[in-house]
Image (cartoon, helix red, strand yellow):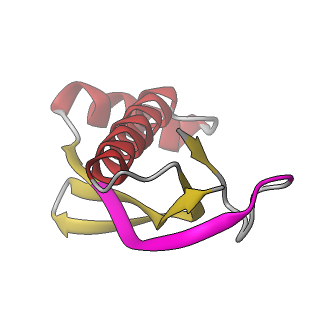
Amino acid sequence: MIYVTTAAIAGREITASLGTVRGSTVRARNVGRDLFADLKNIVGGEISEYTKLLAQSREQAIKRMLDDAGNLGADAIVNVRFTTSQVMQGAAEMLAYGTAVKLK
């Protein structure tokens, strides 16, 4: 399935809008990652464990958004966006959302 951050898909005509689709996941940090992050905070640099955690979260949210669009019979998703929010201390939600559409 095609998904884009733009309102249109080059060379394709949108024939119907099926509504908003979304996918989310909530992930929590763990003690091992937190200790590593604390050390990195002192010396500086990328906290690669959190980078990996967020990348996995984005991929899971995208997959769930694609599944939601597939259940509607969509051909594509336009205006894809991502957002995060803290749901409790040490845990955050990654949300992917967009508009499911039919293509000609």
Residue under the image location 22 percent in, 44 percent down: 27
In percent of width and height, residue 17 lies at 49, 73
Give the main secondary structure of the magenta stretch: strand
Give the camera-side residue of 14 and 27: 14
| Residue at (29% x, 52% y) in the render | 68
Quarter of image, res 84: bottom left
**Residue extending furthest toward the front:** 104
| Total number of numbered discs in the rendering | 0
Question: Residue 62: percent from the left, percent from the top?
Answer: 42, 44
Dividing the image into 4 quarters, which one contains the C terminus? bottom right
- Rendered residue at 66%/53% (across/down): 4
Side of 83 relative to 21 (left or right): right
User: Can you name the residue that lies furthest to the left here?
Assistant: 88
**Foreground residue among 55 and 100:** 100
Residue 11 vs 5, above or below: the answer is: above
| Magenta part of the chain | 11-23
Q: Is residue 62 left or right of residue 101?
A: left
In-front residue for pair 36/95: 95
Q: Is residue 101 magenta?
A: no
Instruction: Tell me what residue is drawn at x 51 percent, y 28 percent.
Output: 48
Instruction: Give residue 91's position: percent from left, percent from top.
Output: 20, 54
Q: Is residue 18 magenta?
A: yes
Percent of width and height locating residue 85: 32, 69
In the displayed structure image, the side of residue 104 where residue 64 appears, left or right: left
Residue 48 higher or lower than 44, as above or below? above
